[in-house]
Amino acid sequence: MIRYGKSSGALLSHKQNFFADNDKLLAEGREIGSIYTDQPRRVNCKCCAEPLDGTSFHKQGIEYILCAHCTHLNGAHQDTDDFCRAVYVDNGGAQYAKTE
């Protein structure tokens, strides 16, 4: 049989940490989600500024709202300066934002 395509070995090797560090990554995601859900509720679509209504679905304890006007998917809470500071600056953000 002749097969066409690339080997998946390099991809699996690259993604191996997702399997090895799954519990740690999940805990970090839940911590970020907890900080996010403590922020004020979003009342307008981040894309078109139309009012948001209801909840479209939940994922890992976070509500998401699909805008009825432009169909943009919004998180139900605002990504405030406090949230961004907590996630990107206070939590080792200097390395995250490093451009060199």
Image: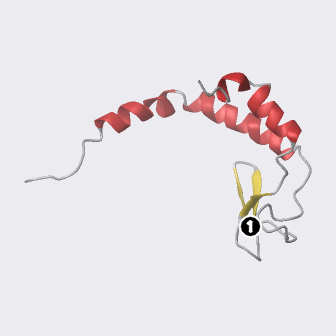
Q: Residue at x 9, y 53 (%)?
A: 2
Classify residue 50 by image quadrant.
Answer: bottom right
Query: Looking at the image, which residue sits at the far right?
Result: 40
Residue bearing mark 1? 56
Query: Looking at the image, which residue sits at the far left?
Result: 1
Determine whether, in the image, residue 53 is placed left or right of residue 25. right
Q: Within 10 angstroms of label 1, few (less than 14), some, or many (20 or more) residues?
A: some
> Which is nearer the eye, 60 or 76?
76
> Which is nearer the eye, 30 or 3?
3
Q: Residue at x 44, y 35 (%)?
A: 15
Q: Quadrant of the N terminus?
A: bottom left
Under circle 1, the secondary element is loop
On screen, residue 89 above or below 32: above
Task: Give the image location of residue 98, x and y in percent.
Answer: 65, 26
Q: Residue at x 36, y 38 (%)?
A: 11
On screen, residue 50 above or below 40: below
Classify residue 8 by image quadrant.
Answer: top left
Q: How many labels, in total?
A: 1
Determine whether, in the image, residue 73 is placed left or right of residue 99. right
> Which is nearer the eye, 91 or 34?
91
Classify residue 14 by image quadrant.
Answer: top left
Determine whether, in the image, residue 23 is placed left or right of residue 94. left
Task: Give the image location of residue 91, x and y in percent.
Answer: 75, 25
Task: Give the image location of residue 70, x and y in percent.
Answer: 73, 74
Tag 1: amino acid? Ser
On screen, residue 2 above or below 38: below
